[in-house]
Amino acid sequence: MNKNQYVAIMAGGVGSRFWPASREATPKQFLDITGSGSSLLQQTVSRLKNLVPIENVFIVSNLIYADQILEQLPMLTKDQLLLEPSRNNTAPCVAYTALHLNAKNPKAVFAVLPADHIIKKEDTFVAAMQKGFDKATKNDAIVTLGITPTRPDTGYGYIDYEGTSEVSGIFKVNSFKEKPSLSVAQQYLDHGGYVWNAGIFIWSCKTILNNFSKTAAQITDVLCKDVSKYATPEEQAYITEVYPLTDKISVDYAILEHAQNVYTIPVDIGWSDLGTWNSLYSYLDKDENKNVTLAPHNEVENSSGNLIRIKNNEKLVVIKGLEDYIVIDEDDVLLIFPRHEEQEIKQLRSSLKDKRFE
């Protein structure tokens, strides 16, 4: 393995669309949301074993999750946690990671991955990532994995890329597209040359920091007031002080939409973005009535199209005559919600929080 290759896993989100299973104290990346026996974060780290040395894996998260991360990933050390004092979106997260790794190793090339994705074809994923690392190591290039679309999905951003490959399997990006309407998404599929933006990026520290200086200088100006603090015992106190002062903006808006040196590798890696209960329903196997039942003791009759998840494996669940619902039973909350209205769950969580229910 190339010791100049690193991976930073972003694991600081709340996962509000997975409420009530995902909470501020224990968000979805720390949950076994699929019933596999491992949390989403543990699965993400596991699939990196053939890509980078374990000591080159870093978790970028919020300060409040440090103990949970080390409990779930005992093979990591505290020095592999980059802990943010505030949630300022992904651009400050990336800039902080680049500055930390650059202080450790100026030749560092690193990938940024979300902690909550499912990837079934791990060998294909590793091969594509290595191709991206090779491109970013030898060139002033930003590389992203683009997921070959299987349907006209309106929940993802899209990447428009050139039809001719400069290097086998690597294409120049023309532009990034916002989440489209259904008709526009269908046009993308019919036209070809579009992939889903999975938020998986690879770049050298030098390349990404140069891009910040061009289009998001406020962030690096704030974080670079004293670069001598990075990769030292004083880093955490310094970041706790300056990080909240950075602009709150995504790396897509801050960097990618402006950069001219962006490339994509279209791939089919069995990818799923577990962002909502419906995405989990789509991913998991269903019974003959199209129910997904994550409860070992159940009696489900005359019901179809439901997602049923019960935290207490000893509880007997009896359901009859229910169609297309989300049923989530936690220790202190029971959610029974129409699947087609699931986009309202995030707002429901906020309104309940305002009423001091959470």
Image (tube, grey):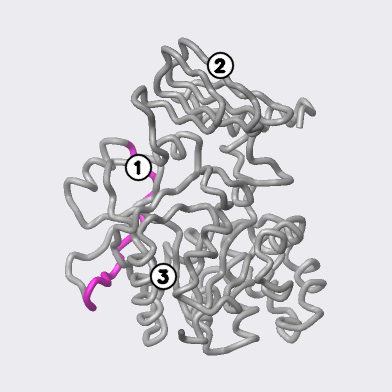
Q: Earlier in the sequence, mark 3 or mark 1?
A: 1
Q: Is residue 169 magenta-colored?
A: yes
Determine which residue is flagged by label 3: 259
Q: Which mark is residue 258?
A: none
Please state which of residues 346 and 95 is positioned toward the viewer in this rendering: 346
Q: Position of 40 compared to 181: left or right? A: right
The residue segment tinted magenta is: 166-181
Q: Say which residue appears at 41% left-offset and 70% top-offset.
A: 259
Three-letter code, disc 2 = Val
Three-letter code, disc 1 = Pro
Please state which of residues 264 and 282 is positioned toward the viewer in this rendering: 282
Instruction: Using a 10 Å C-alpha cutoff, classify the residue at mark 3 as few (fewer than 14 neighbours), some (14 to 19) or many (20 or more).
Output: some
Q: Is residue 258 above or below residue 33?
A: below
Q: Secondary structure at mark 1?
A: loop
Q: Secondary structure at mark 3?
A: loop
Three-letter code, disc 3 = Ala
Q: CA distance from mark 1 to mark 2?
A: 40 Å
Q: Earlier in the sequence, mark 2 or mark 3?
A: 3
Residue 305, located in which quarter of the rendered image? top left
Residue 44 coordinates in the image, percent (x, y): 52, 60
Answer yes or no: is residue 228 visible: yes
Q: Secondary structure at mark 2?
A: strand
Circles 1 and 2: CB atoms closer than 8 Å: no
Q: Earlier in the sequence, mark 1 or mark 2?
A: 1
Q: CA distance from mark 2 to mark 3?
A: 54 Å
Q: Which mark is residue 318?
A: 2
Q: Position of 279 compared to 171: left or right? A: right
Instruction: Using a 10 Å C-alpha cutoff, classify the residue at mark 2 as few (fewer than 14 neighbours), some (14 to 19) or many (20 or more).
Output: few
Circles 2 and 3: CB atoms closer than 8 Å: no
Q: Which mark is residue 180?
A: 1
